Image (cartoon, helix red, strand yellow):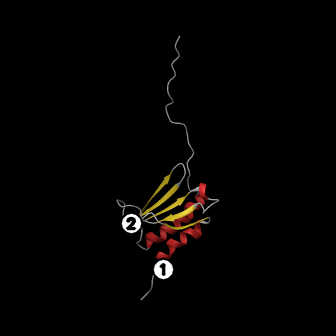
Amino acid sequence: MTVHTSPPLSPPFTECVAFHRTELAVILSLYGRMVAAGEWRDYGISSLQHVAIFSVFRRTAEHPLYRIEKRPDLRLKQGMYSVVGLDGQILKRGQDLKTVLRVLERKLIRAVD
């Protein structure tokens, strides 16, 4: 007698990293101000196994201007939040999201003639 078992229909569930509602509120607040200033126009959110990414675009078809990343594996080392520039350079890293996002808020400050 032969027993045949069918393969599972879906792969086993693996947890992925995601932004919490309070984190998204802080990020979207900054995003709204930058859209109002005409700096940003679109965004994308990725939730992967080891990192959650909020990408900011000037135009939809471009590469992201900035990536706001959450890596919980680094929370005891350099900090789990980071802002990454267009060229892949880490602009700011730390434990507090609001502090890390200040590097982007400086873009809103302009001299008035």
Q: Which residue is drawn at 36% across and 64% down?
A: 59
**Labelled pair 1, 2 in contact (Cβ < 8 Å):** no
Report the number of numbered marks.
Answer: 2
Looking at numbered disc 1 in the image, what kind of residue is underneath it?
Answer: Ile
Residue 57 higher or lower than 102, as above or below: above
Occupied quadrant, residue 58: bottom left
Q: Which residue is drawn at 46% across and 71% down?
A: 34
Residue corresponding to mark 2:
58
Q: Which residue lies furthest to the right in this view?
A: 76
Which image quarter is the C terminus in? bottom left
Q: Residue 109 carries which label?
A: 1
Q: Nearer the viewer, residue 11 or 26?
A: 11
Q: Which of 83 and 40 is in front in this view?
A: 83
C-alpha distance separating marks 1 and 2: 18 Å
Q: Which of 79 and 62 is in front in this view?
A: 79
**Disc 2 residue crowd, few under 14, some 14–19, many 20+, Cα 10 Å:** some
Q: Which residue is drawn at 57% across and 62% down?
A: 81
Residue 78's spot in the image, x, y percent? 60, 63
**Disc 1 residue crowd, few under 14, some 14–19, many 20+, Cα 10 Å:** few
Q: Nearer the viewer, residue 71 or 61?
A: 71
Residue 86's spot in the image, x, y percent? 42, 65
Mark 2 secondary-structure assignment: loop
Residue 85's spot in the image, x, y percent? 45, 66
Compared across the picture, whether 22 is left or right of 63 comes to: right
Nearer the N terminus, badge 1 or badge 2? 2
Residue 88 higher or lower than 36, as above or below: above
Q: Residue at x 49, y 31 (%)?
A: 9
Looking at numbered disc 2 in the image, what kind of residue is underneath it?
Answer: Arg
Q: Which residue lies furthest to the left in this view?
A: 61
Residue 68's spot in the image, x, y percent? 51, 62
Q: Residue furthest bottom?
A: 113
Mark 1 secondary-structure assignment: loop
